[in-house]
Amino acid sequence: MSSIQISKVTKRFNDFTAVSDLSLDIAEGEFVALLGPSGCGKTTTMNMIAGLEEPSEGSILFNGQDLSATRIQDRNIGFVFQNYAIFTHLSVYRNLAYGLEVRNVPKSEIERRVRAMADRMSLVHRLDQPASSLSVNEMQKLAIGRSAVVEPRIFLLDEPLSNLDAGFRAYMRAELKVLQREFGQTMIYVTHDQIEAMSLADKIAIIDKGRLMQYGSPLEVYNNPANRFVANFVGSPRINLIDGALREEAGRMTMMLPDGGEINLSGQVGAAFAQIGSARSGSFAIRPQDIYFGESRAADDIAMQGVVDSLERVGPKRLAYLQVGQTLFLAIDDQDRLTAGDQVEFHLSADKSMAFDLKTGAR
Ligand code: ADP
Ligand code: MG
């Protein structure tokens, strides 16, 4: 029972709608991330999948079956909560053994599986100590290990790494991916961190205000965002989003920047804006990676004149803020060729540019 079909699920708390008409198909063995800002309804969705909350409308099926009458402990779903529920007065060993003991697994088998899990979580030397003596990082490894040791067919993790420091988070991210490959469980992973979602998941469900914005692979949502919200939420450094009035003259589209300057919209992005029409405001989007300096590389690419406002080093590259009127474009200077204050010509790749309707956010 490890594929999950969420159909048209709505969850209301009194007159507040936390989740709205959400549908998701999750295949067996898939690693799906629920990604969205704080308060968008991720935990509420997890709680409904786990059976801790009832949908107000819609259904959740497991391999086509309704489990709402099945006791939660009999569903073979493991969860790691946002605030991990560790028995701090018990030893690390007993914490790891707990889920196996309540499932009546034979003692020798418990011993074997607890030791194997402690080993992979580097907690062997801690087995006899009370969980209360663990560091935050170890506590989190214990929370994950404790749920994973019972080898649930569905594994739900709600922001399991958000309390950890950056280095350890990266390590645990890799560890979780290995764990999932090994056990092949269906995994649903809640996070507000797009980097985490992009690096871990087979598919990402991006949620805003209780609504599904897009459901697709990391590459799909990055390369082909369905709307302005997704474009803005996914990718680092963050995408340039430039809003302005659209003007159409002799079939050519221009975006007027709010405080001086304009973008001559050519190629496919010009055509996309022509569809939106000059009666509306548009939102022009381009990733910093798709802005370049020097000679134009394609006939449709959009040439811009600006001033280098500031530069910010990030490892071997620098982020360059390029000012056109009062609008800033974020680009990447990977050859250290810019100096703050320089007049500079740069190009926006027309193929990589995106057009959104400012009002609806639709592409
Ligand atoms: P997330 O996990 O994405 O941060 P939640 O699912 O926890 O978001 O919450 C979504 C929204 O629903 C929030 O505005 C939250 O205040 C509200 N909410 C969650 N649980 C309850 C509840 N039991 N009663 C009332 N409102 C709730
Ligand atoms: Mg939450």
Image (cartoon, helix red, strand yellow):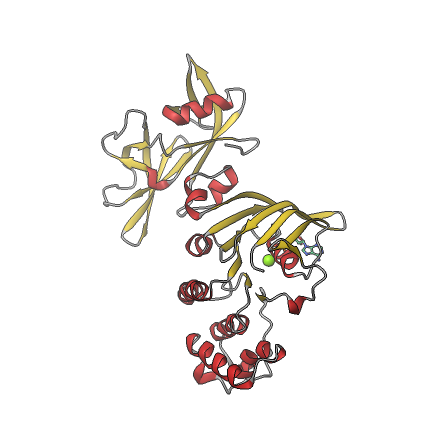
Question: 182 left or right of 212?
Answer: left
**Residue 13 point in image, percent of width and height:** 73, 52
**Residue 141 point in image, percent of width and height:** 48, 72
Vertical placement of residue 35 versus 140, above or below: above
Question: 314 left or right of 11?
Answer: left
Vertical placement of residue 29 versus 288, above or below: below
Residue at image position (52%, 59%) is: 186
The residue nearer to you, when weighing 46 against 107, is 107
Question: 150 left or right of 339?
Answer: right
Quadrant where the image shows the N terminus: bottom right
**Residue 192 point in image, percent of width and height:** 52, 54
Residue placed farthest to the right in the image?
14
The residue nearer to you, when weighing 57 against 305, is 57
Residue at image position (41%, 65%) is: 178
Question: Can I make out residue 262 in this image?
Answer: no
* Image-quadrant location for residue 300: top left
Residue at image position (65%, 69%) is: 73
Ligand 2's quadrant: bottom right
The residue nearer to you, when weighing 177 against 253, is 177
Number of callouts in the render? 0
**Residue 129 point in image, percent of width and height:** 51, 86
Residue at image position (28%, 49%) is: 317
Residue placed farthest to the bottom in the image?
128
Residue placed farthest to the top in the image?
250
